[in-house]
Image (cartoon, rainbow, N blue to C red):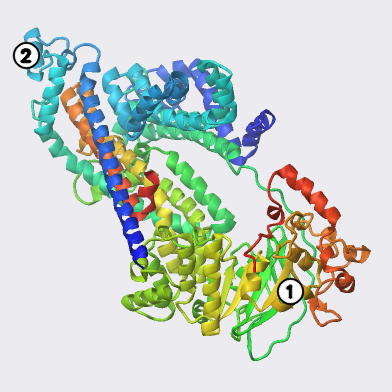
Amino acid sequence: MAAAPRGSAWRAVLRTPLGATAGALLLAVLVLAVAAPLLWSGRAGALDTAHILQGPSAAHWVGTDNLGRDIFYRVLVATRLSVELALGATAIGVVTGLLLGTAPVLFGARVGRLVGAAVNIAVAFPGLLLALFFAVIFGVGRTGALLAIGLAVAPGFARLTQTLTARVSGLDFVAAARIAGVGRPRLLVRHVLPNIGEPLVVNATIAAGNSLLAFAGLSFLGLGVQAPDYDWGRLLGEGLNSIYIHPTAALAPGVAVIVAGLAFNLLGESIAKAIGPGAGRPAGRPPRAAAAPGTATVADDATLLAVESLRVSFPGPVTPVRGVSFTMRHGEGVGIVGESGSGKSLTALALAQLVQEPGVVHAERLEFLGTDLTAGTGRAQRRLLGTSLAVVFQDPMTSFNPTMRVGRQLAEVAREHQGMGRRQSLARAVDRLRAVRVPAARRRAGQFPHEFSGGMRQRAMIGMGLMGTPALIIADEPTTALDVTVQRQVLRLLADIRAADQVALLLISHDITVVRQVCDRVLVMYAGRIVEELSTDDLQAGARHPYTRALLAAVPDMATDRDRPLAVIPGRPPDPARPAPGCAFAPRCRFADEQCTHAEPPLALDSAGRLVACWHTDRVAADPADERAGSDQRAASDERRAAAGRPAADEQEVSVGELP
Amino acid sequence: MTTATADSRRIAGIAQNAWLRFALRRLGRLLISLWVLVTAAFLMIHLIPGDPVRAALGSTAPLDLVNARRKMLGLDDPLWQQYLHYLHNLFAGDLGTSITSGLPVSQLVGDRLPATLELAGLAFLLAVLVCVPLGLTMGVLTRGGRRRPAELAFTSTSIVLAAVPDFLVGVALVYLFGVQLAWAPVAGRGGAGSYILPVVSLALGPAVVLARIVRVETLAVLQADYLRTARAKRLPDRLIYLRHALPNALTATITLGGLLLGGLVAGTVLVENVFAWPGLGSTIVQSILAKDYPVVQGVVLVYGVGVLLINLLVDVALALLDPRSTIRES
């Protein structure tokens, strides 16, 4: 809301096609309003009794009325009165509305509340009804209609002003001005109004358009402008009486009303669009270099899921997942860890075939239970995924449909894919809720999601996945939104399900401790690629990639010196929109040299037979584990943390999980 | 387990209380609004400058007649007494007597109200039947920035159509279908054919505005996490959109739809005059022009009560469709 962009915002309105059209239209209407009566009053008033109620002709473009007056010129001349009255009514409405709406600032909170209640009641009634009410009081005629429409506009405007003022009045600078003893009128004019001006102008513009239409309506009904004066509404009313013999007499003023009304309304709309929230479009992103290919993986009979060179890209183009390859066996627990933005959640969504347009998923191979998922989305594939692949999302608060009962949301899986009836599927849902340890499952099934707690909802979500007979559960940060004790319950539930039914689990988490608890194998992702793959047992001692080591160092354990600050990974993950050549971790890596900044290391077997994507695994391995994070880096992050005033763990989102 | 059931019982109690609180609060608001409406209608006559009876009967009317009429209307009593009298009559269903025709206002209203209700009800039905499928379809088709040309065509058409007031739509329809094509009667209330043009001209504006709102709401709902859940369940598109997206998109639509329905009730005034429809709308205009104030008062009351009832219906529908709204408001 700085002063500088304001002027350019107004100019920007006129640069949009809609804004330019509306602006030009409005200018034409205003010019006509000023010029037409000066130029054509005589011709509009000239009687031609020889040509009464005639159709369009060369002499009279849209014909004549019942006194033989030229309707075309009458419509043009009527522009002034129509626009004048519309603007006058708007002015009355805006001023009254402003006074009513700013009553809390001007006259204090008590008066403000009273006025607010009155405005709330008035707003419930449609403007036309209010206008008719006031037209009765002020009498039939031009002045009466002017006041009536003005007062009918006022409540809506007052409501808007009230809302905006309340928002601004709560801000610090207004409170400061009040404490500094700035008087109420001054407070309003200097501090409040300038900050709510733009939306008010937009609405005043639209209100002017609506007043114009309302005036046309009242005059059309005979309650507005009275003969011998005439505005568009009056011409319309006169024309309608003879619409059979002479339709243009009604259509010409109608068109004029619509054009002028549209000019005001469209200008208002385009200003609103230009200055409203989300007006600025994000700048285009630079194109992305070709993705590095992933390594091939070997599949055997026990393979449940096989992924090769999975890539997810968005227009821009941005490719947050670039060449992910791995396999999972039946009943295996695999964790994907990484900072936020590493592409792990998107990988999970892509595997579950849930990436929506404009995202594009490409994989050289994507097989689940021997079915090629890249082939298409037929009914058979839908049934396979619906019954054999369960997905648990991060936020249980928003992942349930708020308007449906929980039981029904579970039951529809069975109805859709297992051909069960209503009663049978609901019984299955209750049974599954019981299986995920939701107490009083039958009653709970009849409740809405908002009646569930977060942990309960996440369990219900897992239960939803168990409606079929899943071979794989993809859980995307299932515990992140939950508090620590509930986290542990949900993790135990997932582990129990895995053990009981030989269900494979793909657990996505930024919390390496969580992954260590329930998984056999860990895939470490960084900047859209897998940088290391190792078994959970190897994690502590066998990590070879500097990033994995840094992640581990950030997790405190019983041996961590409590007097020293927690370790952090300096720097930020790279922006997928601005990829740099070489290893993506190089800018944050203390082992990085020239080779790292030039060529991206492939995910390959190192000398010890582990899959790592690093040029310097030997040097990393030789590095003493205690020195995982250099003391100079700690000092630097200490300063940064002090400046930001927040705990260290926030800095790179590797949260401290439960201690083993 | 015992603590769990105790807990759940408490939760159920709170939920019931939320409904009760909602009912009480809503009823209170309705009563206050009704009182304001009735008082405003009463004061309307007294706010008119000069003598309303003299104004109604004309400056040539004999003084005796004016005084007799004033006495009949009770205008010579003190204001508070008139107010009490007015309230008392209202509860008895007596809306006063027309100055010009001498008929009871309640009888006039009873004769004219059905025609207006038919018009408004049919128009609302048509608007809803058009806007929900249209908005949902456009929302689904243009989700995630797809089909930009279709989106542009839809939004600009709806903006233009929404800016055209209903009585001008009526005039255009009369010209097109009544005069040029002679498909439908131009005016009056008769067979089914005579309903088409007035209903369409009333419904067109609200229908396109609502369709726009339904589309925007659909777009927002399609981004929601629970829609991803529905897709993860591999439901067919039909169920994803109709069962999971539509009810959630409608909750916001109903709020604005209620406002539009209120406007639609008022819109009958103009449209009835275009089509010479024998309803309350043409009655109120004739009465205002004839300065028949008791009739105006009665019709204003009926319109106002109609609007208040619609607002009540909208709030109740909203509470039923989205149970959270009852709690959120309290």
Instruction: Identify the amino acid type marked 2.
Output: Ala
Work out which quarter of the rendered image holds the N terminus of chain B and state it.
bottom left
Whether residue B50 is visible to the viewer of this picture, yes or no, is yes
Whether residue A238 is visible to the viewer of this picture, yes or no, is no
The kind of secondary structure element at disc 1 is: helix
What residue does disc 2 label?
B68
* Residue at x 17% of width, y 38% of height: B112
Residue A445: image quadrant is bottom left
Q: Residues within 10 Å of mark 2 (few under 14, many from 20)?
A: few
Where does residue A601 sit, x and y in percent of width and height? Answer: 84, 71
- The CA distance from mark 2 to mark 1 is 103 Å
Where does residue A370 sit, x and y in percent of width and height? Answer: 60, 86
Task: Specify the label residue A267 is tagged with.
Answer: none
What residue does disc 1 label?
A539
Please name whichever residue, B197 or A39, is drawn nearer the observer in this view of the structure: B197
Whether residue A264 is situated above or below residue B84 in the rendered picture: below
Question: Residue furthest toward the top?
Answer: B63
Please name whichever residue, A644 or B18, is drawn nearer the observer in this view of the structure: A644
Please name whichever residue, B2 or A202, is drawn nearer the observer in this view of the structure: B2
The kind of secondary structure element at disc 2 is: helix
Whether residue B328 is situated above or below residue A296 in the rendered picture: above
Work out which quarter of the rendered image holds the C terminus of chain B and state it.
top left
* Residue at x 46% of width, y 49% of height: B212
Instruction: Identify the amino acid type marked 1.
Output: Leu
